Structure formats: C-alpha cells, structure tokens
C-alpha cells in the first residue's frame, strides 16, 4: 500500500509474513523537477498496479504528470503532459485508473472552473477608473482590483484604459507586464468600456472632415436649422459652426402623396394590396392635390411612380438620382482627401432607397465611413436627422480610430475573436453593445450612462418608493439624473449647439467638477466652465496647473491626502501637493483683498468658491425635479463620482433632501455600473397612423392598432433575434415596445412605453403630456409617428436587498474606532475650523454610526460628514442622514 504525507512524501509499504515494512519512498513530490524546472505539484493521487508497479499522478498549475516504477526503482520513471492551466480552477479532482487487463494506465484531472476575469474601464475627462473582477480559484477567494489613473499622462503612457488593464493584469498575475508588451487576454471573459472620446471631439470641434450629401436645393438645411432663438436678446449671438466641410447636392426628389391635414385625407389616400414595400396599388389617390408632374412640358401632366414607404404612406418618386453623376462627384471628393459622408435626403425616413444607393456607390469608391440618416434614426423631421447624420459622420471615424488604437495594445487574438474575450461598449442609452454596433452617435454620453445604471441599480428600492437623484461629480463636469423605477430617456438633445436625434439617458450636465478652474472676475467668485482637465490638472497635481475646486477642498482640510492616489509627480509615486495649493490660494486671496478692501482669509476664499460650485451643481437637480413637477425634498440623493462625497452633504442640505446614499464604489461607479448593464439592441420604424384604442383591436390587422402591433411584433422579433445571435437565451430577453405619439396639429412627440399588460398607450401618453406641459388637448386626434422596440438581454439576476431596505432593518451604534482615529482641523461653512475625526472605511463595520464632523476615507473616495449629519455604515454603502 502507499501513504502520502502532507509534505508530498510518498512511501511504499510492504506486508509480508505479518510484518509491515517500508519498501521504497520518494522524499517529496514538491522537489521533483521536469525538464530542469520545479514541478510544484498541488494535488496528487497514488495507486498500485497488479504487477506491483507504483503509480503517482500529480497536477501542478499547468501539467499533469504520471510517475511509475517498480519498487526497486521507485520514483525514477516520469511521464508528463501539458494540460489546461488550473489558475482559474475553483476546484478539481485527480484519479488513476487501469484497464481490465492492466496493460494501460490512465491519469486524469477533472476541474470545475470559477470563470474568467471581468474588466471594466471608464475613461473620464480627468481620471480613468478601472475594475478587475477576479474570480475565486482553488487557491484564492474572489476579489476586485481597483485602479485609478489620469486619463492623460503622455509622459508615461499612450492610452489610459490600456494602461489600467495592464496594471490590473500585473496585480492579478503577480508578474509586471511591460508597457511594450502586447497584452494577452485569453484569461479575460469580457472588457467593457465607456469613453468620452466622441464627446470631447464634439466639444473641441476635433472630428473628421466630411461631406454632407443631400437633396438638391437643401444644401443649407443644417445651416438654417429650425430657426430657434434660444438667446434672442443677446447683443452678440455666436451661432455654432456646422460640422461638415463641404456639400454635395444630388438631383433626386420624392414627396408624399396628399396632405394629412386635409379633412378627407383618409378617404382620398392611396390604398395598397398589402403592407409590404413592393405592394401594388388597388385604389389610386382621389384628391385634387395631385403630386407634381414628372414631365418636361408645362401642359401635359405626367404622373410620377408611386410606391409604399416604410411608414405605410404613399411616396411619389419625382426624380431618381443618376448613378454615374453621383459616382463622379464622390470620386472627386475622395480624391480631395475626404473619407466620411453624411447622407440626408428629403423623406428618407420612409423612403430610404436613394440614401442606400448613394451609400453603395460611396463604398465602391472607397469611403470607409458613410452615415445614412434613415439608418441612424428613421424619424420624421429632416433637420434633426441631418444634424444627427453629420454628427455621426464627424465622430464615428474618430471613435473608430480610438478603438483601433485601443486594440493595438493587445494581442491580435482580441480583435479577431480567437481569444474568446468579448469587448463591449456602453451606449448613451444605458445599454451595452458590441464593437461593430458602436458609433459616434451612440457614444456621446457613454461615460455618464454607466454611472446612471450603477446609481439606479444600487440605490433604488421599490418598496421604499422614493425616487433617486443621481449626483455624479467628476473631475471635469457634474452629471445629474433621476430614476423612479425606470430609466428616463430623451430622443433629442442639443450638445454644444448640435442637435442629436438618438435615444439617450436623460442626463443634465453642468461644467462644474473637481478640476473646474477658479476665477475672481469683476468682483465675483466664478467656478468654471473652464477645466484644468487631467493635464496639467489642478495645482496640487504637481504639473503647474491652475487653482481648482480640488485645491479648495485640499486647503480647507476636506481631502485626506493619506489615501489619495499616489499617481502624481515625474515618477507617478507622489500624492497631491498641499503646499503648492496653499501658496496659490494665498496669492489669490491677496488679490481679492486688494480689489475689495476686505480682509478675507484663505479659508474664506476657498469656502466661497466651494459655495458657488455647490449652487452651480444644485441648479440642474432642481431643473430635473422641481421644473418637472416633482418635489426635490422627496428624493434620495445618490452621490458618486470622484469628488461627489466631498459635496454631498452640502448639496443635500441646500435641496432639503434628508437621505444621501454613497456606494462603496461611488468614486468608480461609472465603471462598476457597466458590470450591471444589460446588452441592448433597438429597432425602429416610421408609422403614420391615427391612434384608435379599443380592447382587442390589436388582433385585427385591418385596424390602426392591429397595423401598429404588426410592426411592433416584426421589430421585436428582429431585435430579440439579434440578442439570441449574441448568445442570450430566450428567457433572459425582455422586449419593450414604445410609440412616438403626438397630438394632431402639434410637432412635439413623446416616446411612450406600452403598458406590460395592455395596449392602452393613450392613457400613459396623456398622463405624461399633462405632467410635462400642464394641459392636454381633449378631443384632438393622437398620431403615432414611430414604433420602436428595445430588446434587453439580462446579464445578471439580482443584487440582493437594497441599501435602503438594509438600513431600515439595522440598529446603529456609535463606532468605537472614532476614539482612536486621527484628528485634523477641517474648515466647515458657518463653523470655521473644527477638530474632525479621520476614519478609514475599512475600520468600520456594518451597523456603525459616525456622527459629524468626520471624514471617511478609502483608496478611492473621501466622504465629508458635516456637523449635524451622521453616517450609517451598511454592507455595500454609506447612508448619510442629513
């Protein structure tokens, strides 16, 4: 028989004539080498062959070895085989077996793998946040690795997300991966990214030069716009420049047959044999307002070709484009160096054929980027379609260049898919998408979207019922959002003068963040909108930057320099420079006192700027709540972002909010939110129907509701099919149906979700309209302009009880670690300098209460607990009772 000691010593014992004696032994399997390298066995199994041969099977991290020999040569025979790495194996077993006649020996290892690593990166304007979720193995428990680094540091690295992933993998593997080495990703399940690349390109007007291709006579459509006058009383109005560099007008034209405002439009309308695009006409148009003639003579009327559009409307084709002319024109622009096009034709939302023709020719000429308005957003209104298409043509090449640059830092197996690692991007609507479906138009608020998802899913409690206001204070700006059980989206928004028609989470942004610059102008304290960004950054970042809100928090003692990331200085190993910030504030204070004749201290000046910043950030919260008919004080404030915890108490107090939630990952919640985000695919189609609801009418395809349902069902199958193709099982796919509805005679449509249990969308539309505008148009027909479906592939099931539910069940007692914690004089508004406890979050346990004044700190965040407030420690969050 064989015995195996804990140190790996294998002993062969022999029983003969009633006596047990040691026949042979191997001192230690851990000392055995294979090919000159230590084997390092982790587990082993022994067995004796019928002929007396001893077999030992041992498994290391990446080898399975079989040792076999007769007793007199025990331990000398070795066979070994390369096996799949056990690094990520949660548990495994080992066995040795013989076949029935003893001629063959088999050693095998069976493992249960705990999964691969998950990587999340959020590239903000100042910091890039990275989280590596490392699964448990048979050696180590599951853990999260958090890395925070500057978004721009050209002296040390080229791309922040790539550098963050490199650092996480170095920590996880215990091997320092050189920056010059291509990163191998076979051990990674997925990489999820959000990026501000497109946003910055739009704000800085640093996108791709491109050509606007449009219908002849409409070359100035974007320049003219919709004639809105947002600043009508300004003495000097600077209208934003258009994004395109040149215009190509194509001799093509289609028009709709008849006018919907005509009282008998339905009776006169063209009727088709079916709802398909190629349907034949069974009843011609009978109205007097015939479409224009396509003949050259002024006397003879030549009827145009009439076809059915995507919306079901009759479309008259007045002029088809000449392919040869288009090809020559596009070749001319291509030869001039243009590589991107935006194609926008009149009525293309319902008749996209001409746009598709031009796109096909452009691809044949060699244009790599072609943005068609009807593909991006097939909705009525040519102006927002045109501005959206030009924005996409302007931003997508920049985004693709960044994506190519990102992939260049990795092994080619990541891009070609052989590594098995999924790369997913966060879209502006809060869903994830693959690389091939990601575009400039979908990425404008990619970064804030991850934070909104994280805020909503970690803070909201259905039983508590209070809506959540998200307060995301980053380095460059502050983003404000609201969640009351569902994500609030907008279909149209204006960013820096550019109107974009695309589904986005409803996020209000204000240029006030940790890196917002401080000025004293005309006797006023001014915060932003200029930002110090990540490079050079605030004064305390040791790069010669200007004074910012971060410097104000630092000199007033509100920042815990002990735990601040040591990523500054020429060697990236120093903390923030308090002395530099203090000197800069002393100089500014002297200037202010000289101009005003007052005798203000550095604390007075710093607190003055903080008060201005707080009011600037509270303003969009009021716009998102009070301006829409909601009571701000009846909300919960969910604070996140790198600087949010330093201002949360003051913001909540000014808004009358009594509860603040701060997640343990609050400073990196935009990255964490991507781990909770679902995969989303949307499909949309124009629809020209007058809403008429009657229970059961959706079953009759001849009714307006039946036709709407038919469109919705077809779109739902298309969207759900795309998610099934991406690997989601049917039970993990949920489809929402939305109708873009408006009152007849108005041009303001509201995208309204269909109730889960009926088709009574009108009730939801009327309620939303009343809340938004304060009145409804009783007796007016409701029109349906578009049908949209949103298919969601769920990536997780539940996060467990909410923080608010946990808080309601706990009893809190004063934390004992407060007495032994470090103390510091911290300046508070209205109190001056007060002795304040500095408490590490790691030293606190669930159920602890920390009364203010106090500062709670960890490696990524600082939470300021003002006098009169109290922090309650939960398992995954901190709740501030104001």
Image: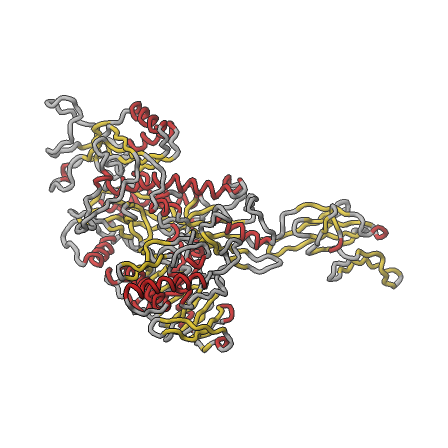
Placement of 453 over or under 440, stated as above or below: below
Q: Is residue 687 left or right of residue 368?
A: left
Residue 19's quadrant in the figure? bottom right
Quadrant location of the N terminus in the rendered image:
bottom right
Q: Is residue 251 left or right of residue 719?
A: left
The residue depicted at 63 percent of the width and 47 percent of the height is 84
Q: Is residue 156 visible?
A: yes
Q: Is residue 694 left or right of residue 7?
A: left
Query: 248 or 85, which is in the foreground?
Result: 248
The residue depicted at 55 percent of the width and 51 percent of the height is 169
Q: Position of residue 842 (x, y in %)?
A: 51, 68
Query: 656 or 562, which is in the foreground?
Result: 562
Query: 604 or 683, which is in the foreground?
Result: 604
Query: Across the whole image, how many numbered discs are drawn on residues?
Result: 0
Q: Is residue 847 visible?
A: no
Residue ranking furthest to the right: 17
Q: Is residue 857 left or right of residue 764?
A: right
């Amino acid at each position: 028989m064989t015995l195996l000691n804990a140190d790996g010593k294998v002993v062969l014992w022999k029983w003969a004539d009633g006596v047990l004696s040691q026949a042979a032994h191997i001192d230690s399997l851990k000392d055995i080498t294979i090919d000159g390298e230590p084997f390092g066995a982790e587990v082993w199994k022994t067995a004796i062959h019928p002929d007396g041969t001893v077999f030992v099977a041992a498994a290391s991290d990446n080898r399975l070895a079989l040792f076999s020999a007769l007793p007199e040569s025990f331990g000398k025979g070795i066979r070994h085989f390369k096996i799949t790495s056990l690094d990520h194996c949660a548990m495994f077993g080992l066995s040795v077996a013989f076949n029935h006649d003893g001629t063959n020996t088999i050693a095998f290892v069976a493992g249960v793998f705990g999964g691969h690593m998950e990587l999340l990166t959020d590239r903000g304007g100042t910091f890039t946040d990275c989280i590596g979720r490392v699964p448990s193995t048979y050696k180590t428990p599951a853990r999260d690795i958090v890395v925070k680094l500057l978004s721009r540091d050209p002296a040390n690295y080229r791309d922040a997300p790539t550098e963050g992933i490199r650092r996480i993998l170095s920590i996880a593997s215990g091997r320092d991966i050189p920056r010059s080495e291509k990163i191998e990703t076979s051990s990674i399940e997925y990489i999820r990214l959000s990026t501000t690349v497109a946003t910055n390109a739009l704000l800085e007007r640093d996108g791709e030069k491109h050509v606007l291709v449009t219908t002849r006579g409409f070359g100035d459509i974007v320049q003219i716009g919709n004639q809105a006058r947002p600043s009508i009383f300004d003495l000097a109005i600077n209208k934003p420049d258009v994004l395109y560099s040149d215009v190509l007008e194509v001799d093509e034209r289609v028009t709709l047959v008849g006018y919907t405002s005509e009282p008998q439009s339905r009776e006169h309308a063209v009727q088709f044999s079916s709802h398909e695009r190629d349907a034949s006409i069974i009843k011609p148009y009978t109205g007097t307002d015939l479409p224009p003639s396509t003949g050259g003579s002024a006397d003879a009327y030549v009827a145009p070709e009439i076809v059915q559009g995507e919306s079901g409307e009759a479309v008259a084709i007045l002029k088809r484009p000449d392919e040869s002319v288009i090809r020559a024109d596009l070749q001319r622009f291509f030869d001039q160096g243009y590589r991107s096009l935006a194609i926008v034709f009149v009525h293309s939302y319902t008749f996209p054929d001409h746009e598709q023709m031009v796109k096909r020719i452009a691809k044949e000429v060699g244009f790599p980027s072609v943005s068609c308005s009807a593909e991006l957003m097939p909705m009525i209104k040519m102006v927002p379609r045109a501005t959206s298409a030009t924005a996409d043509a302007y931003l997508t090449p920049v985004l693709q260049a960044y994506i190519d640059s990102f992939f260049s830092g990795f092994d080619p197996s990541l891009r070609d898919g052989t590594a098995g690692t999924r790369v997913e991007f966060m879209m502006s609507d809060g869903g994830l998408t693959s690389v091939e479906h990601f575009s400039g138009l979908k990425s404008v608020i990619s970064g804030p979207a991850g934070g909104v998802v994280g805020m909503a899913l970690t803070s909201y409690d259905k039983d508590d019922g209070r809506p959540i206001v998200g307060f995301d204070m980053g380095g460059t700006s502050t983003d404000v959002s609201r969640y009351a059980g569902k994500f609030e989206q907008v279909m149209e928004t204006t960013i820096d003068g550019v109107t974009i028609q695309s589904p986005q989470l409803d996020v209000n942004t204000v240029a006030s963040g940790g890196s917002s610059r401080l000025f004293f102008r005309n006797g006023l304290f001014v915060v932003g909108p200029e930002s110090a960004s990540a490079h050079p950054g605030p004064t305390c970042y040791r790069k010669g930057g200007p004074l910012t809100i971060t410097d104000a928090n630092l000199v007033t003692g509100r920042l815990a320099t002990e735990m601040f990331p040591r990523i500054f200085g020429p060697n990236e190993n120093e903390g923030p420079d308090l002395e530099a910030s203090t000197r800069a504030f002393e100089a500014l204070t002297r200037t202010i006192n000289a101009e005003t004749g007052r005798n203000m201290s550095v604390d007075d000046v710093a607190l003055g700027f903080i008060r201005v910043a707080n009011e600037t950030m509270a303003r969009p919260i009021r716009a998102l709540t009070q301006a829409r008919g909601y009571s701000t004080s009846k909300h919960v404030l969910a604070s996140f972002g790198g600087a949010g915890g330093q201002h949360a108490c003051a913001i909540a107090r000014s808004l009358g909010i009594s509860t603040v939630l701060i997640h343990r990952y609050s400073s990196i919640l935009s990255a964490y939110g991507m781990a909770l985000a679902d995969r989303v695919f949307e499909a949309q189609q124009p629809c020209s129907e007058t809403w008429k609801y009657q229970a059961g009418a959706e079953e009759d395809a001849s009714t307006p509701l039946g036709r709407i349902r038919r469109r919705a069902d077809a779109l739902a199958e298309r969207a759900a099919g795309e998610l099934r193709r991406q690997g989601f099982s049917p039970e993990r796919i949920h489809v929402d149906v939305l109708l873009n509805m408006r009152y007849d005679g108005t041009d303001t449509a509201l995208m309204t979700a269909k109730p889960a249990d009926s088709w009574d969308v009108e009730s939801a539309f009327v309620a939303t309209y009343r809340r938004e505008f304060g009145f409804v148009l009783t007796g007016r027909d409701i029109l349906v302009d578009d049908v949209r479906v949103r298919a969601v592939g769920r990536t997780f099931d539940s996060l467990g009880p909410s923080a608010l539910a946990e808080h309601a069940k706990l009893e809190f007692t004063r934390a004992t670690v407060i007495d032994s914690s470090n103390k510091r004089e911290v300046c508070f508004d209205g109190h001056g300098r007060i002795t304040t406890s500095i408490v590490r979050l790691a030293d606190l346990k669930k159920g602890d209460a920390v009364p203010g004044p106090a500062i709670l700190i960890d490696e990524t965040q600082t939470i300021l607990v003002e006098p009169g407030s109290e922090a309650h420690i939960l398992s995954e969050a901190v709740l501030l009772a104001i």
